Image (cartoon, rainbow, N blue to C red):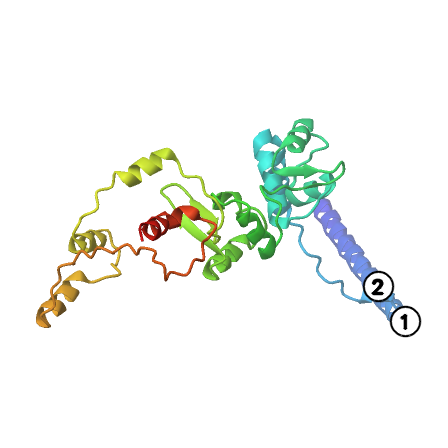
Amino acid sequence: MALKEQLNKFNKQQEKCQSTLSSIASSRERSGTSSRQNVPLPAAITQKKPDAAPVQFSKNTEQLQYINSIKKSPVGAQIKRVIDLLFETRLALTPEQIKERCHVDMHSNKAVFDSLRKNPKAHYDGRRFSYKATHDVKDKSQLRSLVYKYPDGIAVVDLKDAYPNVMEDLKALSESKDIYLLSNSQEDIAYPNDFNCEIAVDDEFKVLFRDIDIPSDMLDVEKDLLKIGLKPATNTAERRAAAQIHGISNKSKDKKKKKQEISKRTKLTNAHLPELFKSLNASSSRN
């Protein structure tokens, strides 16, 4: 019985302590709420901060990996990147600007720097690199003048890198008949439209030209032209049919031209060529 009474007494004390703690906590909450209502909070606390953009590490990692792969690429591959950049921009760029645009660091790679200085497609003035075209022309007028310096023709492939719209200017010059654009089995050639220039012809070509067997009948010539896709300028079959209808002979007549002899009545305008008047002098002496 004594143990039971002590247990009941302990439980009552516990309940009393619990109620006391609860009352203390509720009184503190009421006092804290009233004090916070009277004191204004700073604007930095009351304003809701905007959500910061999440940091994306994946893109930065990919970019760094890409730049690192360029640095580790062969010297030839890095030089090609720089030459392509100079060709597309047509600007004179310092090594720092080149690094910024195509990630090729020439300061840390001496082999790339030395090779680029000696590259035939790059010009280095001691500070900047720029693209070096095969022919230094900048517009259509200079392009036409350049073609006229090559009467035997100039390869179009050597003109393609002159300036960005050089192919359009070549086409325009061809359409205006200033130049001729001809193609062979290997490449396109630009020729000046100037028949006063002297063109050297290979002896081999001369032999081939002379060995060509041309048919004696124009009808056969026209058939051969049609076989290779060329339209003849004449129509022999139609001309012969029309001649038969009208009863005109289509056989060519050989006409021998009579040589005119100089007579006494001929006006002598070539007195400085006495050999022309030998027959006239001989006839006059006989008379």
* In the displayed structure image, the side of residue 43 where residue 91 appears, left or right: left
Residue 219 in the image: state x and y as whole percent.
16, 56
In which image quadrant can residue 112 be found?
A: top right
Q: Residue at x 82, y 59 (%)?
A: 20
Nearer to me, 157 or 26:
157
Q: Which disc number belongs to residue 44?
A: 2
Residue where numbered disc 1 is placed: 38
Examine the rendered structure and indicate whether residue 116 appears above or below residue 130: above
* Residue furthest out toward the front: 287
Q: Residue at x 21, y 46 (%)?
A: 214
Instruction: Give the class, few, some or many, for how many residues have Cα within 10 Å of label 2's Cα (few <14, many ≥20).
Output: few
Inspect the image, locate mark 2, and give the three-letter code of the amino acid beneath it.
Answer: Ala
Nearer to me, 217 or 254:
254
Residue 268, visible in the rendered structure: yes
Compute the Cα span from label 1 to label 2: 18 Å
What is the tally of numbered marks visible in this picture? 2
Nearer to me, 168 or 234:
234
> Considering the numbered disc 2 on the image, is that residue within a helix, a strand or a loop?
helix
Instruction: Give the class, few, some or many, for how many residues have Cα within 10 Å of label 1's Cα (few <14, many ≥20).
Output: few
State which tag comes first along the sequence, 1 or 2.
1
